[in-house]
Amino acid sequence: MRAWIATQVTATGRAAAGGADRENPQAGAAICSREMARWGAATIVFAAGVLAVDVLAAGCGRFGFTPGDPAPVDAAAPDAAGPSPIHQYRLAGTYGDDDGGPALFPQGGSFDAGGYRFGMNQGLGLSSAMPVAVYTVDIKIALDVMMSWRKVLDFKGLKDDSGLYVHDAELAFVEDAGNQVFVSSPPLLTAATPFEVTLTRGTDGIVIGYLDRAMQFSILDSLGAGTFTDPNAFADFGVDDMPTSQMEASAGELREIRIWNVALSPAQITQL
């Protein structure tokens, strides 16, 4: 990965409106009845008035419909909460998953007060946990070196030079190493300073990258560079691939890894 020509892709946000029947409070009540255990309490606005939902401890709800002029509808509010991760690794002295899934395995590092401390190519591996093509992965990490290319996440069992990198203090997703196609953020990162990187890949193949929950780039992953197609969906964190002789890596510290089997929306990312 040398003498790159960057292909910059403009980041775009998305918004989706809710599907409740705002003209029919009874239909809305049925919808809320199904969802109230998840959301706790809500106010749903219809054209004819406001439906207030009060969730009881037993999991049942009271509904009260107030006729009148509707208040503005915040369609993003339910979306912002988002689903829970399917795997969560806090790295507080253990490699285990809070949700009982496969454990991470160390590749030469060890725990310290901040998390998992690793040398060059001594990051963490994970097998049989990553969704293959549609996912969100959130990584809290610090890298000691920001110069040149430093791999953060490898998707292909260390067999391919594509992946998620830090490049001269920029976050970069490399789609096609051979043809020098990648997308990157501005130079926002600082050596030995923790940052949070979030990567989503949707059903449409769009990969979106975030730094500290702010969107930085998006790109159509038409080649599947961001899919975990290696047997057992193997993932490597902080370890470089074999085609570059594992020279594009840095020592650092991993503090937390979370994984979802959906592509979270930008609104949901801000709530992580």
Image (cartoon, rainbow, N blue to C red):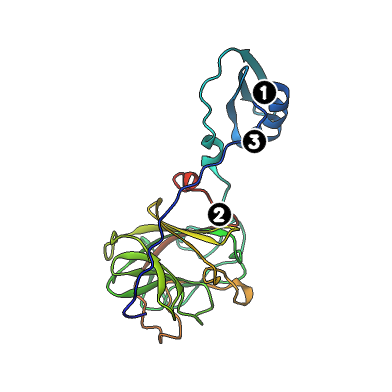
| Amino acid at circle 1 | Glu
Q: CA distance from mark 3 to mark 2?
A: 19 Å
| Amino acid at circle 3 | Gly
Most foreground residue, 48 or 248: 48
The answer, for residue 116, to whether it is visible in the render is no
Image point (40%, 76%), residue name: 180
Asked whether, in this view, residue 235 is left or right of residue 53, the answer is: left
Q: Does residue 174 sit above or below 15 in this rendering? A: below
Name which of mark 2 and mark 1 comes first in the sequence.
1
| Amino acid at circle 2 | Ala
Q: CA distance from mark 2 to mark 1?
A: 31 Å
**Disc 1 designates what residue?**
23
**Disc 2 designates what residue?**
263
Name which of mark 3 and mark 2 comes first in the sequence.
3
Q: Which circle marks residue 19 in the picture?
A: 3
Q: Does residue 162 sit above or below 76 in this rendering? A: below
Quarter of the image for residue 78 reads top right
Quarter of the image for residue 32 reads top right
Image coordinates of residue 72 in percent, x first then y, are: 51, 24
Badge 2 element: loop
Asked whether, in this view, residue 207 is left or right of residue 110, the answer is: right
Badge 3 element: loop
Quarter of the image for residue 141 reads bottom left
Most foreground residue, 254 or 191: 191
Q: CA distance from mark 3 to mark 1?
A: 11 Å
